[in-house]
Structures are given as C-alpha cells and as structure tokens.
Amino acid sequence: MILFIKWGIAPEIFHIGGFALRYYSIGFMLAFTGAYLLLRYVFREEHRSRETLDRLLIYIITGTLLGARLGHCFFYDFAYYKYHLWEIFLPFTFTEGHVEFTGYQGLASHGAAIGILLAALLFSFRYRTPFISLLDRLAIVVPLAGCFIRVGNFFNSEIIGIPAMLPWAVVFTRVDAQPRHPAQLYEALSYALIFCWLFYHYKKRTPFVKPGRLFGCLLIAVFSARFIIEFIKENQVAFERGYLLNMGQLLSIPLIALGIYFLNFYKRYDERN
C-alpha cells in the first residue's frame, strides 16, 4: 500500500480586514530579496556601484510584475480580461456593481521573462550598460527566484500535476482526493539545480570570457525543464485541452530558440565584428 503525502494548508498566513498575507506573496518577496543579495555580491565582486544595483532592482521588479501580469491576462485568460480591462491593473473584481479585493491572482512566468528582457534593455539604454553583460548577470538570479515562486505555488495548491501512483505523489486536499505529481516542486528543484550550475560557471568567469553564454544557457535550461514538466501538469486553462502542446510549451519554444542563438551564434557574430 502506498502512503501518499497529503497537503491542504490554507494559502493565507493571516487576515487583517480585507487584506490577507499569502505564502505565494512570501515566495515573491524571497525571490526578489534573494535576487538582490546575489546581485549585490556580483556587483561587489566586479566593483560596480551600489547605486547602479538599486536602480536596476527597480527596473527588474517593475518589469517582472508587469510582464507576469500582462502575460497571464493576454496568454491565458484574454477571453475574460478583454471585457474587464481595468481588472488587469487593479487588484479588484467588479461584478454586478459589487467590488471585491482579490489581489493579483494571475501571473505568468513567460510574461515575466519578457518583462525582464524589456526592463533590462531599457536600463541598458538609460544608463549605458552593455545589454548582454547585464543579461548574463541577471541569468544567475532568475532560476533562484523561480525556485522560490514555485514553492509558493505548492503552498497555494496550484499548478498541480496529473494523477500519479508514486510514493512521493501528493494529495492536494483543497483540490481533490487524487494523488498527483508535485509538479511545482519538480520545477523548483530544477531551477535550484540550474541556479547552482550557472553560479558555478559565473565563478569560473564564463561571462567575462564568453559574453551571452550564461544567458543562453539560462533560456535553454529553464524553458526546456518547463517544456518537459508541462507534460505532467494539469492544463491551466480550458482551451488547452485537446492540443498536442499547451500554452506554457508553445511560449517556451521561442525562448529556447533564443537561448540556442546566444549559445551557438552570438559569439561568432561578435568575433566577426
């Protein structure tokens, strides 16, 4: 007889009036805090100013949150948000004259990736920082942040896996009584390992010798892991049913292709010029 893990913890840590602190929010705070501390170490090692780092953090946080929010609304739930445009940016729902505070309950990692790229590009133009150099440094912290966020998803009992009869399968009691793959933890572990691998290569001075290589490795590793793990996830939205690949996989393909470009072609182009 297999003894499955039962998981039914409430997503809210506490309530104060209409405000609730969620484990998922803690995951995001840990993601940004960990990213900041790691980038502070990198900037200190490279003798870059703390002021530059603080400015960069503002750009990256804004790009991450805005990109993640827009990514969810346009990639996964546009059928709803095209009739509720204000709810894209406001943490409320407006239903039949009733206003309810809901927070931002919809963030997409692919949107966050696009938001980070655009924020880094804007920062590089504004402060005359080499764009590829910046992406190589950000590549180190992104998988660590992703790890914290996926653990937050696990606490929320969301982005669950398909049914499984395995000793480590989890029964998300807030969802149903079916043992399932803990897909969130698979991703969290994958991202933690990718972080360790990229940080090792940073310590070996890879970004100084081969610009763009860490960024390319990040895109290939993270989104290949995401592509594979999607096969054992439940579809997040109804329109994905019946399709060979879901939205998460379709959005991963161009990012993997971009990673292959940076890994195999960017340096060659740079050498010719």
Image (cartoon, grey):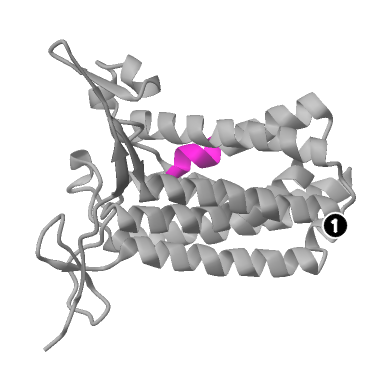
Residue nearest the viewer, comparing 196 with 57: 57
Please state the total of marks drawn on the protein image. 1
In which quarter of the view is residue 100 placed?
Answer: top left
**Which residue is pictured at 78% across the width and 67% down the height?**
203
Q: Is residue 186 left or right of residue 77?
A: right
The residue carrying mark 1 is: 45
Which quadrant would the C terminus be assigned to in this image? top right
In the image, is residue 204 part of the stretch drawn in magenta? no
Report whether residue 130 is seen.
Answer: no
Position of residue 13 relative to residue 66, above or below, is below
* Secondary structure at numbered mark 1: helix
Position of residue 6 measured from the top left corner of the image (x, y, whole percent) = 19, 70
Which range is magenta? 109-115
**Which residue is pictured at 42% across the width and 62% down the height?**
187
**Which residue is pictured at 30% across the width and 61% down the height?**
231
Position of residue 182 measured from the top left corner of the image (x, y, whole percent) = 30, 66
Which quadrant would the N terminus be assigned to in this image? bottom left
Chief SS of the magenta region? helix
Query: Which residue reaches farthest bottom?
Result: 1
Position of residue 191 relative to residue 52, above or below, is below
Amino acid under disc 1: Glu
Position of residue 177 measured from the top left corner of the image (x, y, whole percent) = 9, 64
**Which residue is pictured at 17% across the width and 48% down the height?**
242
Q: Is residue 144 left or right of residue 138?
A: left
Position of residue 233 relative to residue 6, above or below, is above
Residue nearest the viewer, comparing 104 with 110: 104
Report whether residue 66 is seen.
Answer: yes
Residue nearest the viewer, comparing 199 with 173: 173
Using a 10 Å C-alpha cutoff, classify the residue at mark 1 as few (fewer than 14 neighbours), some (14 to 19) or many (20 or more): few
Q: Is residue 200 left or right of residue 27?
A: right
